[in-house]
Amino acid sequence: MILPSIVIILIIAHFLSKFRESPYVDYAFRGIRPVVLGLVTSAALTVAKDAIIDIKSLIIGGVLFYFVSFKDMHPITAIILAGIAGAIIY
């Protein structure tokens, strides 16, 4: 299932490189940005509904969000720490 996706992305990248300087391509990407933001926000809210089960999980998520967003912690490190904290607490 991965191979067709890679082929499609390579074809799009090939044609996009030809039209990189086009203002229409720039307009299209500017229009896509809010859509991507909405999709990511929707996915985050869906995951949050299932992940936040009590105040302890909310604290773990909040603390790690703070460190990733404002203290430049790598997200993989945050995921590992969240797993360790969850294993210890629960």
Image: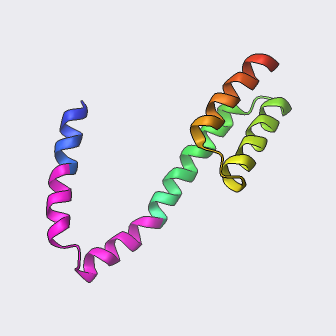
Q: Quadrant of the C terminus?
A: top right
Q: Quadrant of residue 80?
A: top right
Given residues 86 and 31, the one toward you in this image is: 86
Q: Is residue 64 visible?
A: yes
Given residues 64 and 22, the one toward you in this image is: 64
Vertical placement of residue 14 versus 50, above or below? below
Vertical placement of residue 39 versus 2, above or below? below
Residue at image point 65% right, 52% down:
72
Q: Main secondary structure of the magenta part?
A: helix
Q: Which residues are magenta?
A: 10-33
Given residues 76 and 27, the one toward you in this image is: 76
Identify the residue at the far right of this view.
Answer: 55
Q: How is the image coloured?
A: rainbow
Residue at image point 19% right, 57% down:
12
Vertical placement of residue 52 versus 26, above or below? above
Residue at image point 24% right, 30% down:
1
Q: Position of residue 9 (x, y in %)?
A: 22, 50
Relative placement, left or right, of 43 versus 11 is right
Residue at image point 62% right, 35% down:
77
Q: Is residue 90 visible?
A: no
Q: Quadrant of residue 23?
A: bottom left
Relative placement, left or right, of 48 versus 12 is right
Relative placement, left or right, of 14 versus 72 is left
On whether residue 30 falls in the magenta region, the answer is: yes
Q: Position of residue 84 (x, y in %)?
A: 71, 22
